[in-house]
Image: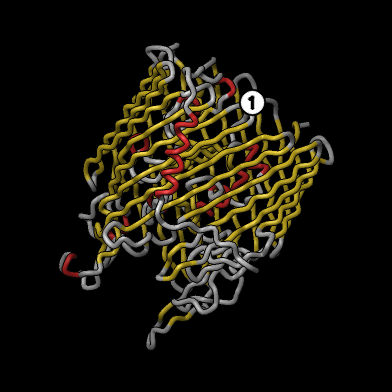
Amino acid sequence: MRKVNLSSTSSLRPQWALLALCLPQLVTPGLARAEPEAADTVQVIGTRVPTALSRIVADVVVIDRERIRATSADSIEDLLRREGGIQLSRNGPPGQSASVLIRGSSASNTLVLMDGVRVGSATLGQTDLAAISLPQVERIEILRGPGSSLYGADAIGGVINIVTRRGEGDAALSGNAAIGSHRSGEGSLTLSGATSMFDYAVSASGETSDGISAVLPGDALGQYNPDRDGFSRTGLQLAGGFTWTKGQRIGASYSASRLRSQFDSAQFLPPDFLPDATPDFRNRLETQLAAIDYSGVFSDEWSGAVRASYQSDSLSSGADVISVYDTTRRQLTAQAAWAPLPQQQLLFALDLLRESITSTDYSAPDRDNTGLVVGYTARFGANKLQADLRWDHNSVYGNQSTGKLGWGYALSPAWSLRAVAGTAFRAPTFNDLYFPNFGIVTVLPERSRSIEAGIDYRDSSTTLAATAYYNQVWDLIGYQSDPAQCPPGFGFGCAGNTSRALLQGLTVQGTQQWGDFRFTLALDWLNARNRDTDETLPRRASNQQTLAVDWNSGPWQLGGTLLNVGSSPDGGVLLPAYQLLNLNARYRVARQWQIEARLQNALDESYQPVKDYQGSDRIFWLGLRFDGRWL
């Protein structure tokens, strides 16, 4: 099949110039009227308290439940990659280890929260999104840009908050079941609802697939095994709350997931130490999150919230020899919001975190972190202001201070401008600090300083947002190959703050409703470079585009998504660009019953998401969904 290469040059000057040329045409006389916030999407990620999108300055997008249910994506990571400014790194097809990169930052520089709680591995320093089942998700909030001033470490590129189900309205039962190619199957069941005082939600889901071989034949490390690398994934979520009077709620939640996946690798045994890829390598990943929380409105001016949580991430990986990496996090958060004047709000927050790890490879002391946050949001006529300041003290790497300042201006009822400047940091992982013959306890956190400018348009049928950003990162943590730069005893190198990076780009994202049709477009241009060598950072495509078309009329829903990913360097080679076409169709046979079909990678495109790994081939799904009141 002939490939269409939509890649552009690495220079971003034409895109910045295009944005600058458009601005004079968008300015219209007069000041804006604030849009009715009752019709505005409410999010938490941009301010840490429920706030309408029209009131914040940060670059935030919300993927709601309707979009999740209508998508042809089969995983959280595939859903996220369709948003502007987000790229996917996955070691093969669905079910393999997966993470996302926001604005060219590494997976370790993207902070993932679940219901506002930090999740993932403290040894690897990232969250494997393949472990989280999509049916568990109510909505996803994405903050693109620095987030350390609100959430602390690891938010250089941005923050993703995965919000699970909560009960509301009359009791309702929903579920789905589907079968697909490669002996794949999936199913979910949810019961939720609320009374005048109680709310509840119970959800269970499961997925399985025989899959395909994750590694391509002839890989450089000799890891190819012709067997199928299948996976199974299960999820459970329980949530409930008690509201004894208006504005006063106490709640509890528990979520768990289990991922079992096969993968290709090799072991090197004496006497010849040649790669042996024949063993059956498997990952066994289990995650749990339990939390209790209280939220209250005390007056017209004051509100507050307290949450205590326990999170664990347990990975067992290998074949004949199994390595274990367990993370445990205990977190306590308390915050209060004060609105002394209309359209103004102050936030005060305290975050306490203890991280512990156990591993078959090494031991390490616990580390404690205390974070203090002050935030301010305000609107003065056509102007919006947002300022955040955070101080973190960590028992291992000391003190870190971060801040963010944003300004927005309404040009008209539809058009607005925004600008944000901020600092952020990434903490060294436990592996960076303590892994045998690699970790160094004196490794410093990565630091960043960024600026961005954007323009937005919104009316009843159209949304458009364009953001240009420039982010400098210092003290990148990597492998220091020169033993002379390491402490005595590290004869083969060590961890170190080895380089600097420049991340700059332009993201354009918009939607258009035209009768029964809805068009969604996301365009992303990225220049991610090592400032010391001037080389492009690995696994970063210079451009990525998504076009989705959905048609909804009567009982029918039809949709298609075309994703183009530009070429990217990895492992010393330039991986070619690729295009993926996903199709979906739904037909409502009765008020509560719907037949669904999905065709992923409809053109059967052959591509490498990362070097020597292959993506999924064409997969067809057919299923049935039920959504109705409890009888």
Q: In terms of depth relative to the viewer, which is nearer, 262 or 462?
A: 462
Amino acid identity at mark 1:
Ala
**Vertical comparison of 186 with 578: above or below:** above
**Vertical comparison of 340 with 463: above or below:** above
For the view shown, which residue lies furthest in the bottom direction? 271
Q: Inspect this view and state whether residue 252 appears.
A: yes
Q: Secondary structure at mark 1?
A: strand
Residue occupying image coordinates x 40% and y 36%: 453
**Vertical comparison of 490 with 327: above or below:** below
Q: In terms of depth relative to the viewer, which is nearer, 460 or 225?
A: 460
- Residue 600: x and y in percent read 67, 57
Q: Inspect this view and state whether residue 119 appears.
A: no
Residue occupying image coordinates x 64% and y 46%: 548
Residue occupying image coordinates x 51% and y 17%: 33
- Residue 360: x and y in percent read 37, 63
Would you name the residue on which mark 1 appears?
A: 194
Q: Quadrant of the N terminus?
A: bottom right
Quarter of the image for residue 434 reads bottom left
For the view shown, which residue lies furthest in the right direction? 589
Q: Is residue 450 left or right of residue 99?
A: left
- Residue 188: x and y in percent read 67, 46
Q: Is residue 429 left or right of residue 300?
A: left
Q: Is residue 284 left or right of residue 380?
A: right
Q: Is residue 354 left or right of residue 555?
A: left
What count of labels does the image hold?
1
Q: Residues within 10 Å of mark 1 (few under 14, many from 20)?
A: some
Q: Quadrant of the C terminus?
A: top right
**Vertical comparison of 26 with 247: above or below:** below
Q: In terms of depth relative to the viewer, which is nearer, 495 or 80?
A: 80
- Residue 34: x and y in percent read 51, 19
Q: In terms of depth relative to the viewer, which is nearer, 144 or 410?
A: 410
